[in-house]
Amino acid sequence: MFVGPRMKRDLVTVTPGATLEEAARLLKDHRIHHLPVVEEGDRLAGIVSDTDLRNATLGGIFVVADRGDSGRPVTVGEIMTREPLTLSPGDTLDDAMLVLSRHRIGALPVVEGDRLVGIVTKADILSALLSTLDIEGLGVRIEVVLRREMKEVARLVSALADQGVEVRSLVLALHGADGYAAFVRVATIDVASVRDRLREKGFAVGELSDFYDAR
């Protein structure tokens, strides 16, 4: 999955000279948490968040007049994050997740060269995962503990096919020192029978305790 198809293209932006009050109004009106800051030609200059704005206020009141000797910031350019971390449309959502998680940020501007073309947020990543795993569709998840051998994964798929079960998604994760945890979402209302038949074929259909005990 690539960033390009998932990023927001209809962007709400500000310029460095916009006042903090203007930025706050845009965030509220559009129900968003981040504003890319652009200069002439859609060149990315920075990004400002609702947290930046809160930190720049005194008692929740924005300074809209010239600051004079107060020393308090007035414009977006004074509080924005300059040279923010960015992505390109060809980067993967895996890349986006890693950057968002490691740097504990909520959004990443997407650029081509230095020109802003989109923005991707944690909510966009979550939406992509929900779609990929088909969590909102009909189905029940089964956890199967396998030896870390691809032939075991193939045997599981074959066993499900023998039952005529529709598999909506299948995710493999490392489990313990030498195993896989296969998380299978199947479209059936008789999940108990699916579990029983898998056990009859020698599969370890996991219980919650199996995943807590894994090291």
Image (tube, rainbow, N blue to C red):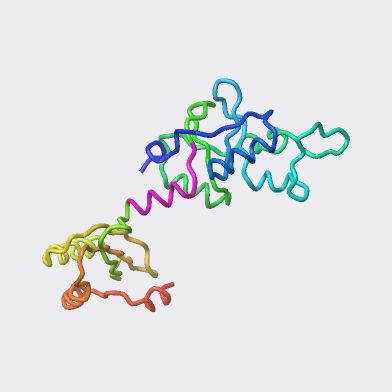
Decide whether the magenta segment is chiefly helix, strand or loop. Answer: helix
179 vs 21, nearest the viewer: 21
What residue is shown at x 12% (from left), y 64% (from top)? 164
Residue at the farthest right position = 69
Decide: is 73 above or below 155: above
Q: Quadrant of the C terminus?
A: bottom left
Residue 214: horizontal and vertical position, in percent?
41, 73
Using residue 120 as the reference point, say whether residue 26 is left or right of it.
right
Residue at the farthest top position = 41
Decide: is 186 above or below 43: below
What residue is shown at x 32% (from left), y 55% (from top)? 133
Place residue 19 in its image quadrant: top right
64 vs 152, nearest the viewer: 64
Q: Quadrant of the N terminus?
A: top left
Residue 32: horizontal and vertical position, in percent?
54, 44
Residue 125 colored in magenta in the image: yes
What residue is shown at x 73% (from left), y 49% (from top)? 60
Place residue 82 in its image quadrant: top right
Using residue 163 as the reference point, say whether residue 173 is left or right of it.
right
Decide: is 98 above or below 12: below
Q: Which residues are magenta?
A: 119-131
Label count reads 0
What residue is shown at x 57% (from left), y 45% (from top)? 33
Residue 114: horizontal and vertical position, in percent?
54, 26
Using residue 136 as the reference point, say whether residue 85 is left or right of it.
right
Residue 102: horizontal and vertical position, in percent?
55, 51
Residue 213 colored in magenta in the image: no
Using residue 36 as the reference point, say whether residue 191 is left or right of it.
left
